[in-house]
Image (cartoon, coloured by chain):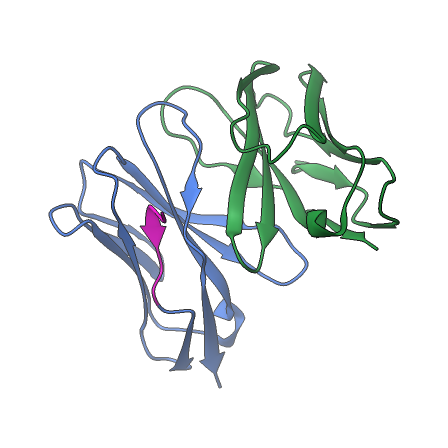
Chain colours: A blue, B green
């Protein structure tokens, strides 16, 4: 049973537009959420995180939004650039340094 | 600063052979994680260590899999005997302890069992 779900396997966006990647979770004990970016033949790279005490965290072109009541988070990338084309993984964990639970990823293609 | 280093990057071997994957975590990190990525199941946690001690190995699929962390700078994941269904990309990650810390991943070992 998947505790972290990314329902869109792929997404295509034009360069300069906003990319919105979505993630849903089922475990109400999760209180820390992360997004990772993965290029082919490389490991996932940490992008941005958010604690459950916040509902928004911004870092440059990347913003993560958390809706605890809906158990939903999203990653916004604006403006999207061709170099953002990668697979994006959503991950979540409970309190302490517990392991991450990953979604299956969304492949983002930014078209020039 | 060096990131998480995994070796080998690629391994192709015949069914029944022993396979050993290696990982050097980021210096100073005291948690280490082994993951397996497949098309069907995505990224799955196999085992994790904290201060060199295995904390949770419930993700290890079978007794054929074993992992060790003899010191803070080295870990191995061993499969003996290997089977074709073990073919996957295996990632190692490390993190600092103390509250929520992001995990940092190596570039993985692509394992193919023929």
Numbered marks: total: 0
- Give x and y (percent) for residue B23: 72, 32
Magenta-colored stretch includes residue B54? no
Which image quarter holds the C terminus of chain B? bottom right
Left or right relative to B108: residue A38: left
- Residue at 78% x, 48% y is B9
Q: Residue at x 14, y 52 (%)?
A: A70
In this rendering, position of residue B81 left or right of residue A21 = right
- Give the main secondary structure, helix, strand or loop, of the magenta stretch: loop
Above or below: residue B46 compared with residue B110: above
Observer able to see residue B20: yes
Along the viewing direction, whichever of B13 and A6 lies nearer the viewer: B13
Given residues A57 and A3, the one toward you in this image is: A3
Name above or below for residue A5 compared with residue B91: below
Q: Is residue B106 visible?
A: no
The image position of residue B8, as x and y in percent, is: 81, 43
Can you give x and y, in whole percent of width and height, for residue B20 in the image? Answer: 80, 34
The reply to whether the magenta stretch includes residue A6 is yes
Picture layout, residue A36 above or below residue B21: below
Which residue appears at 84% of the width and 47% of the height?
A: B15
Q: Residue at x 59, y 61 (%)?
A: A39
State the residue in front, B20 or A56: B20
Q: Residue furthest left?
A: A69
Q: Name the quarter where the N terminus of chain B is drawn.
A: top right
The stretch in magenta equals: A1-7
A4 relative to B41 in the view: left or right: left
Q: Is residue B4 above or below residue A61?
A: above
Q: Position of residue A42 (x, y in %)?
A: 65, 55
């Amino acid at each position: 049973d998947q505790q972290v779900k990314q329902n869109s396997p792929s997404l295509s966006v034009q360069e300069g537009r906003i990319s919105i990647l979505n993630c849903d979770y089922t475990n109400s004990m999760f209180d820390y959420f992360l997004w990772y970016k993965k290029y082919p033949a490389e490991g996932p790279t940490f992008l941005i995180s958010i604690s459950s005490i916040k509902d928004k965290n911004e870092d440059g072109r990347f913003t993560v939004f958390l809706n605890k009541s809906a158990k939903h988070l999203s990653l916004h990338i604006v403006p999207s650039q061709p170099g953002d084309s990668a697979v994006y993984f959503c991950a979540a964990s409970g309190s302490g340094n517990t392991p991450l639970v990953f979604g299956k990823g969304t492949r983002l293609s930014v078209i020039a | 600063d060096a990131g998480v280093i995994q070796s080998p990057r690629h391994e192709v071997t015949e069914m029944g052979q022993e396979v050993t994957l290696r990982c050097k975590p980021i210096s100073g990190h005291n948690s280490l994680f082994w993951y397996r990525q497949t098309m069907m199941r995505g990224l799955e946690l196999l085992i994790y260590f904290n201060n060199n001690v295995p904390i949770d190995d419930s993700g290890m699929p079978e007794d054929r899999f074993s992992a060790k962390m003899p010191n803070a700078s080295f870990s191995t994941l061993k499969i003996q005997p290997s089977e074709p269904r073990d073919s996957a990309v295996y990632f190692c990650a490390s993190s600092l302890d103390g509250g929520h810390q992001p995990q940092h991943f190596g570039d993985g070992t692509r394992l193919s069992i023929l």
